[in-house]
Image: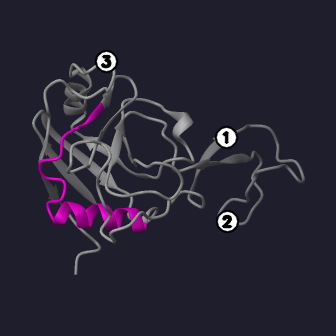
Amino acid sequence: MSVTLHTDVGDIKIEVFCERTPKTCENFLALCASNYYSGCVFHRNIKGFMVQTGDPTGTGRGGNSIWGKKFEDEYSEYLKVQPRFRTSPLKSGALGTRACASGRRPTSFSVFSAVLARLHNVRGVVSMANNGPDTNGSQFFITYGKQPHLDMKYTVFGKVIDGLDSLDELEKLPVNEKTYRPLNDVHIKDITIHANPFAQ
């Protein structure tokens, strides 16, 4: 599942995590399908941090969900597992180990650490903007790098899979030093939805 933002500085293709964050993605895709985001400016742009958009008023204070009200965050129960391999023998009661798929105990063990799928751990993470817990509307942002302090505070619902060069161009834009608004408006012209599992 993906969408492409067609902007004044180029295209940005985003993979959308419908299974991990179904309500957030339902809202986002419905807004995309209704052309809600067409004409929206990137109203906040902080080099090395993130760029924000999704407010049709262009002020950074507007925007509504498809339900006409704020909706809850989605991140607390979504985990992914990253394997880490060690060569030492498996010890009885070793913490964080799993038997292999065959049911046999391996001669060496794999330690699995639960890593939250919501991590703002790379450039190009796409998250909902909010004013506190459970206040999601229409605004979203894209990170310019790792931002671990945002984890558990903002719902991650996608990632950039193509168009990082366009993201580079956004990051280069000169901005007002006090408001971080680009000196020249850059818009989302329109959005292509490549597949929408929520469409009727």
Q: Give the residue drawn at x 90%, y 53%.
A: 92
Using the image, determine if residue 9 lies above or below residue 79: above
* Three-letter amino acid code at the position of disc 1: Phe
Q: Give the residue drawn at x 32%, y 64%.
A: 65
Which portion, as a residue range, is magenta?
A: 22-44
- Mark 3 / mark 2, whichever is N-terminal: 2
Using the image, determine if residue 122 lies above or below residue 68: above
Residue 155 pos. (x, y %): 46, 52
* Three-letter amino acid code at the position of disc 3: Glu
The residue that mark 2 highlights is: 102
Residue 113 pos. (x, y %): 67, 46
- Mark 1 / mark 2, whichever is N-terminal: 1
Using the image, determine if residue 141 lies above or below residue 62: above
The residue that mark 3 highlights is: 177
Q: Nearer the viewer, residue 146 or 129?
A: 129
Q: Nearer the viewer, residue 32 or 195?
A: 32
Residue 129 pos. (x, y %): 40, 47
Q: Is residue 71 left or right of residue 45?
A: right
> For the C terminus, which image quadrant?
bottom left
Q: Give the residue drawn at x 54%, y 54%.
A: 133
Q: Give the number of the disc on residue 154.
A: none
Is residue 124 in sight in this rendering? Answer: no
Q: Give the residue drawn at x 26%, y 63%.
A: 29
Using the image, determine if residue 195 lies above or below residue 55: below
Label 2 Cα neighbours within 10 Å, binned few <14 / some 14-19 / many ≥20:
few
CB within 8 Å, label 1 to label 2? no
Question: In the rendered image, which quarter is residue 148 located in?
Answer: top right
* Three-letter amino acid code at the position of disc 2: Ser
Residue 31 on the magenta span: yes
Q: Given this view, does label 1 or label 2 mark the residue nearer the observer?
A: 1
The residue that mark 1 highlights is: 85
Q: Secondary structure at mark 2?
A: loop
